[in-house]
Amino acid sequence: MSLVLPGAEPFMHRGGPTGCLLIHGFTATPQEMRGLGEHLASQGHTALGIRLAGHGTRPADLARSRWGDWLASVDDGYRILRAACDRVVLLGLSLGGALALLASTRYPAAGVVAMSTPLLPTGGPIRFGLRPLSLVYPFVLKRPAHWRDPNAARERVAYPSYPTRALVEVSRVLQVLRASLGSIDVPVLLIHSREDTLVPPKNSQAIFDGLRSADADKQLVLIDHSTHVITCDAARGQVFDAAALFVRRQSEVPA
């Protein structure tokens, strides 16, 4: 019997020579990227939605994962697409956006779409030692989320809690990203909701400001009527259209 949660399975749509690697966020699953993947596939692109290590099974598996495991999952997906496509665009949500940006420093990417992506250091317990805290409180229940689209909230496939030890790994990803930001020179599209309280939009502004990419190759799009998971919430159509336009533009650049 499969240990993967129903709806958390990876997906792939075979299409044209531009590959779209879709990377979900922390404690989430490929489900939150499925709609975007289908939209990109309808535009003729090849779309692969990966499942990050430790996700989509049980929270205890994520507690044992390290940030290098997540980057290795991205690496596997990239290699699958690169073997079948002329170019690869990396698209990630939240932690997935941070991993997409980091991955663009490791191997050639046609561009990056980073959505609801964190960068800035967080306050509270992360700054005062989550590792020892995880021995006492291994899991932290999530607070109720406020979605603009209640149907999207009901369809969500994700863990109900944060493994405290894994939060340490998220902070490490962001440390590495902050140190690497100035070396990212590929085209980048940043999309963020003005209503995102989990990762405020000032994070995307900080990413935009720190990118080495030329001004003509980077764009920040702010949207309304969505909270953090903008690929699923009420304004997802706007997100899909912006991402698809970006991918189409990168597809027109000779590989």
Image (cartoon, rainbow, N blue to C red):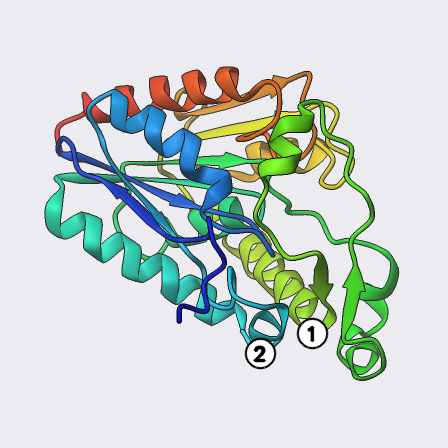
Q: Which quadrant, please, contains the C terminus?
A: top left
Kindly identify the residue that appears in the image at 38 percent across and 62 percent down: 73
Please tell me which residue is depicted at 54% across the width and 73% down the height of the picture. Answer: 66
Where residue 95 appears, x then y in whole percent?
56, 50
Q: Nearer the viewer, residue 192 or 36?
A: 36
Percent position of residue 182, x then y: 50, 46
The residue drawn where x is 60% and y is 52% is: 158
Q: Are marks 2 and 1 in contact (CB under 8 Å)?
A: yes
2 or 248: nearer the viewer = 2
Q: Is residue 102 above or below residue 89?
A: below
Visible residue check, residue 245: yes
**Could one spot residue 183 in this view of the protein?**
no
Residue under pointer 2: 64
Instruction: Please tell me in which quadrant of the rendered image residue 18 appears.
Output: top left
Residue 231 vs 62, above or below: the answer is above
Say if 39 sits above or below 103 in the image.
Answer: above
For label 1, the SS is helix
Q: How many marks?
A: 2
- Among the two numbered marks 2 and 1 on one chain, the one whose residue lies closer to the N terminus: 2
Circle 1 residue: 165
Relative to residue 80, is residue 119 drawn left or right?
right
**Residue 173: which quarter of the image?**
bottom right
The residue nearer to you, when weighing 23 against 54, is 54
Residue 184 position within the rendered picture, expressed as x and y whole percent measured from the top left: 42, 44
Q: Residue at x 57, y 51 (%)?
A: 28
Q: Secondary structure at mark 2?
A: loop
Disc 2 from disc 1: Cα separation = 8 Å
In the image, what residue type sits under mark 2?
Answer: Arg
Picture quadrant where residue 205 is located: top right
On-image quarter of the N terminus: bottom left
